[in-house]
Amino acid sequence: MPKKPAHQNRIEMLQGTLDLLVLQTLRWGPQHGYGIARMIQANSQQALQVETGSLYPALHRLERKKFIAADWEKSENNQRVRVYRLTPAGKKQLAAEQSWFAKFSDAIASMAKPPVGESDR
């Protein structure tokens, strides 16, 4: 597999992480797919880029689980777009995911510390 140029190096996201990011983004209000991808990119200081090949399967998966709902609407350009919104079940799932992610982040951060009972060598 050829190595990607440095400017194309992207953080690979696990499916659950992408789901969390989508739910987190939709808590601020309904959004179409392209808007979700742009918000994730902007709010991560350009560190996270979500490609359509990952985003739309995640949106469909979350919709099947009833965590989000979608409706067809007209955009400012008078084009039909699918707009996604968080459901009550999605809000509960988001809270659970945030709790899990906080514990996970703390566990990863603790790995940078010396082992318990050991001093920094």
Image: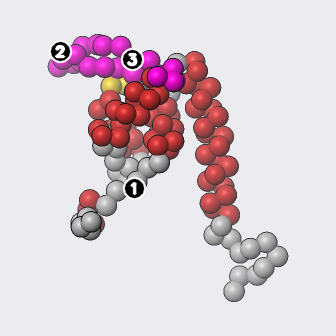
Q: Amino acid at mark 1?
A: Ile
Residue, disc 3: 70
> Residue drawn at (66%, 40%), measured in percent from left and top?
99
Residue, disc 2: 78
Q: Amino acid at mark 2?
A: Asn
As drawn, 107 above or below 118: above
* Secondary structure category for the residue under label 2: loop
> Does residue 107 appear anywhere in the picture?
yes
Residue, disc 1: 11
As drawn, 2 above or below 99: below
Q: Check the image and name the residue furthest to the right.
A: 117
Upstream in the sequence, badge 3 or badge 1? Answer: 1
> Residue drawn at (51%, 24%), measured in percent from left and top?
65
Upstream in the sequence, badge 2 or badge 1? Answer: 1
Q: Which segment is the magenta one?
A: 64-85
The picture places residue 70, in percent across and down from the top left corner, at: 39, 17
- Judge by depth and name the residue closer to the eye, 87 or 57: 57
Quarter occupied by the C terminus: bottom right
Q: Amino acid at mark 3?
A: Ala
* Secondary structure category for the residue under label 3: strand
The picture places residue 50, in percent across and down from the top left corner, at: 34, 44
Q: Which mark is residue 60?
A: none
Label 1 Cα crowd, 10 Å radius (few <14 / some 14-19 / many 20+): few
Residue 12 in the magenta stretch? The answer is no
Residue 66 in the magenta stretch? The answer is yes
Q: Nearer the viewer, mark 2 or mark 1?
A: 1
